[in-house]
Image: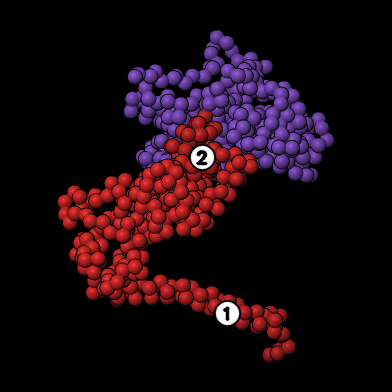
Chain colours: A red, B purple
Amino acid sequence: MSSEVTNPFETNDQERRGKKIELAVKYSTLAMTWLLIIPVLAIIIFLVYKAWPALSVEFLLDNPEKKMTAGGIWGPLIGTFFLVLVSLIIAAPIGILAGVYLNEFARDNWLTRFINLAVVNLAGVPSIVHGLFGLGAFVYFLGMDRCLLAASCTVAVMTLPVIITSTKEALASVPMSFRVACWNMGATKWQTIRTIVLPNSISGILTGVILQVARAAGETAPILFTGAMISSRIADSGWDAMVPYGLEDRFMALSYHLYIISTQWQNVPESFKFGTAAVMIGLVIAVNSLSIGFRIYLRARKKW
Amino acid sequence: MSTVAPQLTRTEFTPTSPKRADEYSIRTDDLSLWYGDFQALMNVSVKIKKGIITGLIGPSGCGKTTLLRCFNRINERYGNVTTTGDIEILDKNIYDEDVSVRQLRRSVGMVFQRPNPLPISIYDNVLFGMGIHDAHKSLSKSERHDVVEEALREVDLWNTVKDRLKDRATTLTLEQQQKLCIARLLPLKPDIILMDEPCSALDAEGIEKVENLIESLREDYTVVIVTHNMAQARRATDECIFMLLGEIIEHSKTSEMFLNPQHEKTEMYIQGRYG
């Protein structure tokens, strides 16, 4: 038995140190990931716990009563729904068409680069600045006064950059070889986009739009000066309760409602504040889940 | 409103006008091309005969693909391209004002290195070209089916896929995909088929089958094929064009080029000394 055979692959001190660092990095990154999840869970559990006494179907469907010390949040809820709806009706076509132009038609020149830079910067503008811009541009300059339309336009401007960016990314994910195949058979760019590029990127485009629902519903600052109001009397039932606000009316919205009952009004039951917040969070989670589910569904059908 | 769908026709070799050996499908005269500041083609003058298979060979970056892309003006889609000189396809200068680029690309089809069937059904892939040229509107359902069958039979794919025409084209093997990419050009009645390394993504068996298919296209179509594979150039082409750094070095019958190359550079290249 020869014990002289030395191990040619023996480890050394440097490697042992490296292994420790490896483990340290792995577990510290894991810890940070958990730190991310904990606040999310904590917020949801805390909100639901605090809101529990108020949460009920009536809370959703009744209007605020007696300076918001009784009743529910139907008015703000439906107001937020229309705000999101109108703002997306404005922003989605503009954003998608702009994204199509930037990805499919625009050549790489200084103007395109400038537009792309502007889009990126627009996405970084604080929402309160959007609010002030909306006040100046839509409420005063265009003379809309404070109303649902002015607020929706403001929110639309805020969501546009993200819709443009997500549209561009969705289009860019369609392999170039498909376009090349079409062009070489004599297809125009529009024929190529209509028959091949859009059908294969629509899931990504719609996901981008749906994710903006959550953002449009959540922001307070853009609607603060442009159309949200503290309280408006709306009908308790019938058509007027379903569609309480016209485009030229001021409206209640969940985010603004929460701000008001939390800071401006006395004697609002604590569970009402947390209830409103819980409903908002619930809406955001529901919309995001919807978009993820939608994405999974469309992805399963697409294959190349 | 009733629109008459345009009829897709091609210039046929009719028995009364027998094909002349000196009849050319493609002629370029003093063709130069720049990508930005980089000159990719230098005063290329070449005549490619009708109804034969012509190979474009040369090391990477010598301009083979660029030259191929000139013949259907697809280079213009790649941006920042400048071209000088003339290209005549079927005796018509394709830079003339009255040339429709879409009709040119219908008549001059292209097959790519990586098979690129569209992410739609096999059936729709074959009819796609007719769709974009509005040529299938006048056809009944059974006539469309006949178009698909004829095209797939011509590439020897019909028997394999006839029971799954509604399947996605991307579910086919690479060899079948490449055949489909050739088949989808045929309903457009092309005169010329350009192929950019059509076999380089295929295995040996696939290469053989696709080469046999290309062979069967001879006479009916003018085929120009870019290849890196010297053995393939030798067995699958009638004439060869050797390019180097954007210039044509030699253009001769394949047998002559491989047996008796006129230029030292050609000889060294086909012997595999560089490139």
- Mark toward the start of the polypeptide (2 vs 1): 1
Q: Position of residue B26 (x, y in %)?
A: 65, 23
User: Is B73 rendered above or below residue A287?
Assistant: above
Q: Position of residue A75 (x, y in %)?
A: 26, 58
Q: Position of residue A82 (x, y in %)?
A: 31, 51
Q: Which mark is residue A101?
A: 2
Q: Nearer the viewer, residue A10 or A254?
A: A254
- Helix, strand or loop at mark 1: helix
Q: Nearer the viewer, residue B14 or A266?
A: A266
Which quadrant would residue B24 be assigned to in this image? top right
Q: Position of residue A13 (x, y in %)?
A: 69, 84
Q: Residue furthest top?
A: B16
What residue lies at 39% left-to-right and 18% top-to-bottom?
Answer: B4
Label 1 belongs to which residue? Answer: A23
Marks 2/1: CA–CA distance: 48 Å
The disc numbered 2 marks a residue on which chain? A
Callout 2 amino acid: Tyr
Q: Nearer the viewer, residue A139 or A79?
A: A139
User: Is B20 rendered above or below residue A271?
Assistant: above
